[in-house]
Image: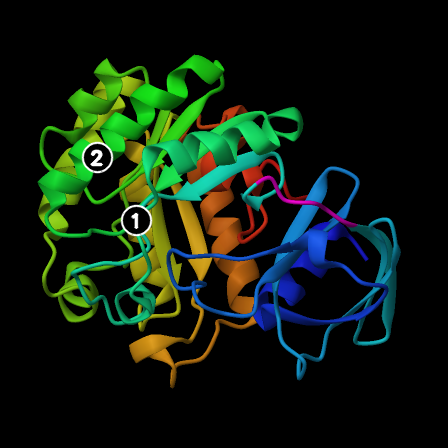
Amino acid sequence: MRWKELKTRLLAVGSTRLSGEPADQFIARSTAGPGAGGDGSVFFSIGRHRVRLALDPDSPVEIAHRGSGVADLFFEGILQNGRLEEPGYHCPGQAFITVTGSCVFNCTYCPVPHLKGQRKSIDEIVSMVQAVRHRISAIALTSGVLSTIEEEEAYVSDVVRHLTPFGLPIGVSIYPTEQTPDRLHALGVDEVKFNIETATPQLFAAMCPELDYDLIWGVLERSVQLFGRGRVFSNVIIGLGETDAEMERCIRRLTARGVIPVLRPLNPVAGASLMERPSAERLAAISAMHERALVAAGLDTRQALTMCTYCTGCDLVPGKDA
């Protein structure tokens, strides 16, 4: 079976049981986004390809760890040999760090506001990067909002100043103000990700009623002016009630502006717990739309330096997953 087909089917499930030898060093734990607060996840890889699966003892997928990262994946009668990858922080190859693990906003699909996580100190973040410097090639920062959007931006900017001496590409994904792209660009940040989250403004208003959809679009356009085409990204969740046609229009709107969409299958948690993950068939169809739009816009995911498109674990990434 080709990698892309296998990964599509695995992402439609989104989870795995883990058996065999102890694998603590290979388990990543998320403190941001819809995957936050669970039992952790593992990255299963075959050569250059990888997929991230949440740990769930009831999953129909099984990964058997044979020791030293060697692992076998069992799913629907398939046996696939591969490896578990050791994460830097959150994902392999990067220190992908959540600065503030709490949020004052209450987006329907996100558990972070209920977890009441802590803000990391700058010294703690610098120490985290130092601890994994030998096995990473990038730094990525994301964050909730501890008090206000403006205060969060100022704090993350201070974090960036302290991480610049590592000499690694830095990507930042936070909820923005109008001035955020200019300020991050002035600090030397390499890539940014500002998330529109939903395929339509109506869904955004329903899912994130406290946030400003139009502001994010304006910030994305300004970011492309500063960082360049293909250095700006935006998450769009698949499975919140949009049609395929609505998703394609959203993808085309992003790529036409030089933004690379990060198309994330819904994780049914928090207020979205009664919704369903998108099927493998739908993920495959939307991935084909995504690929056509990227080609038409002349955008290449293989040039990504940081964050989700560089990692590829949680999403199908045209140009990297084949």
- The amino acid pointed to by label 2 is Tyr
Viewer-nearest residue: 121 or 43: 121
Mark sitting earlier along the chain (2/1): 1
Residue 230 point in image, percent of width and height: 40, 26
- Please give the range of residues in magenta: 84-88
The residue singled out by tag 1 in the image is 119
How crowded pointer 1 is (Cα within 10 Å; few <14, some 14-19, many 20+) is rated as some
Q: Quadrant of residue 255?
A: top left
Q: Is residue 104 left or right of residue 271?
A: left
The colour mode here is rainbow
Q: Is residue 276 magenta?
A: no
CB under 8 Å between discs 2 and 1: yes
Viewer-nearest residue: 68 or 271: 68
Quadrant occupied by the C terminus: top right
Quadrant occupied by the N terminus: bottom right
Residue 36 point in image, percent of width and height: 43, 63
Residue 280 at least partly seen: no
Viewer-nearest residue: 320 or 173: 173
The residue singled out by tag 2 in the image is 155
Q: Look at the numbered disc 2 and give the secondary structure of its residue.
A: helix
Residue 301 point in image, percent of width and height: 51, 32
Q: Look at the numbered disc 1 and give the secondary structure of its residue.
A: loop
The secondary structure making up most of the magenta span is: loop
- The amino acid pointed to by label 1 is Arg
Q: Is residue 45 left or right of residue 67?
A: left
Q: Is residue 116 left or right of residue 61?
A: left
Q: Quick check: 195 above or below 75?
A: above
Q: Residue at x 25, y 27 (%)?
A: 158
